[in-house]
Image (spheres, rainbow, N blue to C red):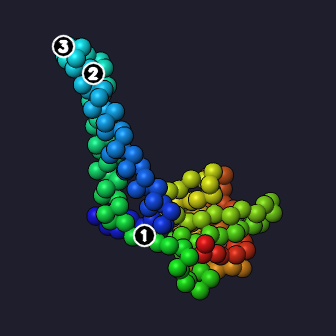
Amino acid sequence: MTSVPLTKFGAELLKEELHQLKTKERRIVIDAIAEARSHGDLSENAEYDAAKERQAFVEGRIAELEGKLSAAQIIDPTQLDAEGRVVFASTVDLEDLDSGAKVTYQIVGLDEADLKLSKVSVTSPIARALIGKSAGDVVEVQAPSGPREYEILEVRYI
């Protein structure tokens, strides 16, 4: 498996989810399976089928998280020295040149991307356009509504 880039914060979120799945969700699923088995015939027991399906999901997610964390390349943005360039984990202040609207994004790993929190995946069109650029540069982003131009106002490593 190739390395999975994660911010320090993103790695902590995945560790918390893994802990939750292993300590709480697993126990809930085991109890649900035991309860469903106590109802008798398993061949037509919808509760048993649902509990086994949930168990498969939980175990699959545990394996996925363990794999990602073991292959993680954890990056602390405060330790970056990219000489003002946009890199993974940096926070970028932008101005939309058409509307004048100002936005701020942090470039993060796929698992931690959340647009509501202004965190965009390193694989997103906007992040791909920004990587390697510096404050003052103008980038063109291929958005679903068509191309948009942004000026990079500031690059921070916070």
Q: Which mark is drawn over residue 35? A: 2
Q: Residue at x 28, y 37 (%)?
A: 56
Say if 85 sits above or below 59 in the image.
below
In the rendered image, residue 116, in percent from the top left (x then y), is placed at 63, 51
Q: Residue at x 49, y 66 (%)?
A: 7
In the rendered image, residue 147, in percent from the top left (x then y), is placed at 66, 60
Q: CA distance from mark 3 to mark 1?
A: 49 Å
Placement of the C terminus among the 4 image quadrants = bottom right
Q: Residues within 10 Å of mark 3 (few under 14, many from 20)?
A: few
Q: Residues within 10 Å of mark 2 (few under 14, many from 20)?
A: some
Q: Which mark is drawn over residue 41? A: 3
Amino acid type, label 1: Ile
Q: Is residue 115 left or right of residue 154?
A: left
Q: Nearer the viewer, mark 2 or mark 1?
A: 2
Q: Nearer the viewer, mark 3 or mark 2?
A: 2
Q: Residue at x 55, y 84 (%)?
A: 81
In the rendered image, residue 127, in percent from the top left (x then y), is placed at 56, 66
Q: Residue at x 36, y 38 (%)?
A: 25
Q: Is residue 103 visible in this depiction of the protein?
A: yes
Amino acid type, label 3: Asp
Q: Is residue 123 visible in this depiction of the protein?
A: no
Q: Earlier in the sequence, mark 2 or mark 1?
A: 2
Q: Earlier in the sequence, mark 3 or mark 2?
A: 2
Q: Is residue 84 left or right of residue 37?
A: right
From the viewer's side, name the closer residue of 125 and 37.
37
Amino acid type, label 2: Glu
Asked whether disc 2 touches disc 1, contact meaning CB atoms under 8 Å apart, the reply is no
Q: Earlier in the sequence, mark 3 or mark 1?
A: 3
Q: Check disc 1 and report the residue beneath it.
A: 74
From the viewer's side, name the closer residue of 132 and 142.
132
Say if 55 sits above or below 112 in the image.
above
Please tell me in which quadrant of the rendered image residue 149 appears: bottom right
